[in-house]
Image: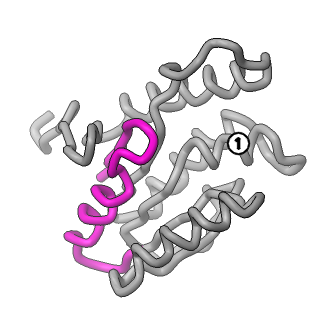
Amino acid sequence: MFTLITGGSACGKSEYAESLVMGLPGERIYLATMEPFGSEARERIRRHLLLREGKGFTTIERFTDIGNVPLPAQANVLLEDVGNLLAGEMFREDGGGEEAVLSGMEKLLTRCRHLTVVTNETGFAGKNFSEETLQYMRSLGRINCLLAARADRVAEVLSGIAVIRKELTHDQ
């Protein structure tokens, strides 16, 4: 099973994703993709770790190459988030670009009982971006579309409320 959760910044996506994964039987892995650049990123990571405390998640940090991360068999994986993963794949020297994100997701799907992926909406803010930023935004938009097409469930979180945009049943 593959669930994609999308929405704007600080809208409650993480809390919703965690509640979904906590309701699943089996081991819970939190695959964290935010590289701790600067004090703001470190503070955000610290806050997320505190929010997950006592919820039974094992945290694995991985900034690129998610398809090869060591995982227990049939674990429930929460990947947060695609935007940070794409930044690592696009801007780190050892990154593999957009294709590495997509192929990594496919590899994870073959190894997980349930994959829950958090991503951000793109394209709603501002208009004066560098070409590099525009390229990143276009890539994230393409990845989001492809993941949504592949997902069994797509939820958009708006002000803390999850709206199911796609739900496949076993009959479909």
**40 left or right of 21 in image:** right
Residue 4 belongs to magenta span: yes
Residue at position x 40%, y 75% from top? Answer: 52
**56 left or right of 85 in image:** left
Q: Where is residue 29 in the image (x, y as percent from the top left)?
A: 45, 73
Residue at position x 38%, y 39% from top? Answer: 6
Mark 1 nearby-residue class (10 Å; few <14, some 14–19, many ≥20): many
Q: Element under label 1? A: helix
Residue at position x 61%, y 58% from top? Answer: 33
Using the rendered image of the protein, determine whether residue 154 is visible from the camera's viewpoint: no
Of the pair 168 and 95, the residue shown nearer to us: 95
Residue 20 belongs to magenta span: yes
Among all residues in the image, which is located at the extreme top? 127
Q: Where is residue 124 in the image (x, y as percent from the top left)?
A: 48, 20
Counting the numbered discs, the total is 1
Q: Where is residue 101 in the image (x, y as percent from the top left)?
A: 62, 42
Q: Position of residue 77 (x, y in %)?
A: 42, 65
Specify the quadrant of the image occupied by residue 45: bottom right
In this rendering, the answer to whether 54 lies above or below 140 is: below
In this rendering, the answer to whether 79 lies above or below 170 is: below
Tell me how the rendering is colored: one colour
Specify the quadrant of the image occupied by residue 9: top left
Circle 1 residue: 87
Of the pair 41 and 96, the residue shown nearer to us: 41
Residue at position x 13%, y 44% from top? Answer: 170
Using the rendered image of the protein, determine whether residue 172 is visible from the camera's viewpoint: yes
Q: What stretch is highlighted in magenta?
A: 1-28
Of the pair 155 and 152, the residue shown nearer to us: 155
| Amino acid type, callout 1 | Ala
Among all residues in the image, which is located at the extreme bottom? 54
